[in-house]
Amino acid sequence: MPRAVDGTRRKDRRKKITSQTKGYWGRRKNAFRTAKDALAKSLEYSYRDRKVRRRDFRRLWITRISAACREEGMTYSRFIEGLYKSEVKVDRKVLSNLAIEDRDAFRQLVSTAQAGLKG
């Protein structure tokens, strides 16, 4: 009876994992068992941190909008409330970009928000 030799499946599976751990430090990049654990943990972190990144960017945009609003003599919460009452649908990313790059357009939005608060 011929001798059973491990086929390519085992090698392919291990190669797939170790190729994904290239650049890791120490044995985490080439010792299969350690690499498998490190890869599993890194995938958990990347899944979690994609959500954290969205949260952090939203916080940054709100901070920028708030600073620009205060320069115009208005608070962030009143500004957003005025935009909602004026039925202006612009997301915070765009508002932040306007606050940085196009101050005149942002001033017009502030005046629109103030008008929405009054009427």
Image (tube, grey):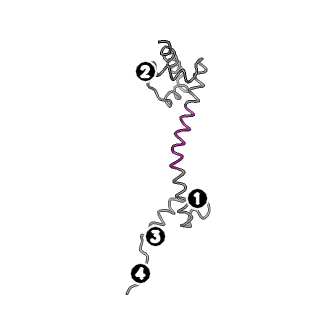
Residue depicted at 56% across the width and 26% down the height: 65
Return the x and y of residue 112 as percentages of the image width and height: 48, 16
Which tag is nearer the camera, tag 3 or tag 4? 4
In the picture, the quarter occupied by the N terminus is bottom left
Q: Give the x, y percent position of residue 52.
A: 54, 42
Local packing at callout 4 (Cα closer than 10 Å; few below 14, some 14-19, many 20+) is few
> Secondary structure beneath disc 1?
loop
Identify which amino acid the numbered label 3 is placed on: Lys
Which residue in the rendered view is the most extreme toward the bottom?
1
Q: Quadrant of residue 56?
A: top right
Name the residue carrying label 1: 24
- Identify the mark nearer the N-term, 4 or 2: 4
Residue bearing mark 3: 11
The CA distance from mark 4 to mark 1 is 34 Å
Please identify, in this view, whether the residue under mark 4 or under mark 1 is nearer the observer: 4
The reply to whether the C-beta atoms of the residues labelled 3 and 4 are less than 8 Å apart is no
